[in-house]
Image (cartoon, grey):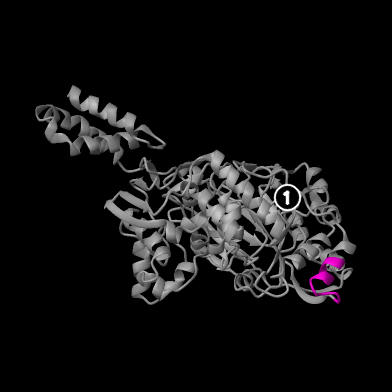
Amino acid sequence: MNLVRGRLRRVRARLAVVSIDRCAVDRIAARRVAIHAPRFRGAVVRGIAALAACAALCNAPLPASAAVPDKTLVFCSEGSPAGFDPAQYTTSVESTASAYPVYNRLVEFAKGGTKVEPGLAESWEIAPDGLTYTFHLRHGVKFQTTPYFKPTREFNADDVLFTFDRMRDPDNAFRKAYPVRFPYFTDMGLDKSIAKIEKLDPYTVRMTLSAVNAPFLSDLAMPFTSLLSAQYADQLLKSNTASDINQKPVGTGPFIFRSYTKDATIRFDGNPDYWKPGDVQVSKLIFAITIDPSVRVQKLKRNECQVMAYPKPADLDMIRSDANLQMPSQAGFNLGYLAYNTQHKPFDNVDVRRALDMAIDKDAIIKSVYQGAGQRASAPMPPTQWSYDKDLKDAPFDPAKAKAMLAKAGFANGFDVTLWAMPVQRPYNPNARLMAEMIQADWEKIGVHAKIVTYEWAEYMKRAQAGEHDAMLIGWTGDNGDPDNWLAVLLGCDAINGSNYARWCYKPFDDLIVKARATTDIGTRTKLYTQAQEIFKDQVPYTPIAHSTVYQPLGKNVTGFAIDPFGPTQFAGVGLKSP
């Protein structure tokens, strides 16, 4: 028995495991002792009872959830989601409406932070060479029961394999039945990075990478890796309704999808079987889609909603002065910018891009659009991101020099251009229409005639990813705390049909970010990312405009809310005080 106990202690000590409880480590240790059981002979016989007790404890069903409080929380959201399949989308609208209420991931970001912690994988091991990740899945997790799907088994390794194989394998049956793009998965190079995924047993999955991928765990915590039900997918395939996965979601998350009326409401019920019952604090969660921020704030003041998205800078003082409201805030992990489509002439000419950049009066924009809630941006990432290059400087605002540069580039008489303005408000751009009008006026002074174009949000994003724009206002809130999420996702060659709206593929830059991703040494990565930022500044694929402060207006009775540094609004653990 002492031999068994000794091996258990040694295995625990050697495991490079992240876990939320001792039980997860004991389960793995017990499994490894069992593998080597013949070496212990009689001692193992005496230790079987102890191991069985550990297994019984660890594999016991999760505790029955407490009754979900009979309360309704209303969120005044800013836009309609394009769908409810998180793998297809890159904006916080879809993450807020699907990835976080409905789904979970193998690993999750800690609430309100950037640290990776266990999710549906209760623990994991990373091989010394950094190429193999072994995930030990949580037992007793139930998929949601809905009017359109009733699961007959719990979450297991088959669901992990289906989720990732659908994104990885063009010949996957479900992908053929419902052919869609997975922009984040490809933007981040995971289609090339993940060489193999194996089911070792019903609760163990091993992922093998083709090369070291430093941000891999953080990537797996992002919304696009939300885990789907393979059983539900099979049901959809058999009924020839595969596309319903984007309209009728099923996950393991804290809220169960009930209905969606475009541009009006999304309704969710609290999940009574959620594996973290303390995170379900309301029985009804309703998204009241309210595009106008002035209307959102009035609804909040009348208690028609208790949480609202994206206040106008002009409304901040009024919200602060209302005794029935609260408004936490924090420095934004974001960037608003103007992307030039480098695949459209004349934006393929770097001197044209430099001239347009030099002609924009950023200080005037920050004063009028952000109204004190923004700071000037010079780099392709925010100052709070490690490896940020604080030495990058903007070219001076100089319309005369910009006009001369255009003439030298062959455009003495200027040219016509479409300038796209987002139809929705974002922390990184609280008023895209006004910003577009100010840029339009600036460019007119150098002979560039901009026609402002906008579309409904989902259409705006769809057309932008197809490369229809000349220049467009867009922005980004970091997703995982890694520089790769800024430089590769927004500027890498692999991301041209995804979030690289500049459609810019520049090999000297791309070589640096690929090399940085393949090493885990922070010092080396920082040097490579600094060089990449210098190239960005010289080539100007987009003009950084501003980083903004994030404000989150709430009713005074809202409890448990935390601002997500990555942008989505999350409701796990959020409740309401009783009157």
User: What residue is at 33 percent from the left and 46 percent from the top?
Assistant: 139
Answer few, some or many: residues within 10 Å of disc 1's Cα (few below 14, many 20 plus, some between 14 and 19): many
Viewer-closest of 10 and 58: 10
User: Residue, x 82% and y 65% (percent of image)?
Assistant: 439
Q: Which residue is drawn at 59% across and 43% down?
A: 526
Left or right side of 516 for 132: left
x then y, percent, for residue 235: 35, 69
Residue 291: quadrant of the picture: bottom right
Total marks shown come to: 1
Which residue position holds label 1?
A: 547
Furthest-front residue in this view:
408
Relative image position of residue 530 (x, y in whole percent)? 63, 46
Relative to 435, does residue 116 appear above or below in the rendering?
above
Magenta includes 405?
Answer: yes
Q: Disc 1 marks which amino acid?
A: His
Q: Which of 332 and 340 is in front in this view?
A: 340
Q: Nearer the viewer, residue 267 or 525?
A: 525
The local secondary structure at tag 1 comes to strand
Please, which residue is most extreme toward the top here?
2
Image location (x, y in percent) of residue 449: 83, 74
Q: Pick the quarter of the image with the N terminus.
A: top left
Q: To which quarter of the image does residue 266 belong? A: bottom right
Judged left or right of residue 334, residue 15 is: left
Residue 28 visible to an observer of this rendering = yes
Tell me if residue 575 can be seen: no
**What are the residue bounds of the magenta stretch?**
404-413
Is 328 above or below relative to 257?
Answer: above
Verify whether residue 291 appears in magenta. no
Q: Which residue is at the far left? A: 42
Q: In this view, does 182 lie above or below 384?
A: below
Determine whether, in the image, residue 142 is placed left or right of residue 336: left
Quadrant including the C terminus: top right
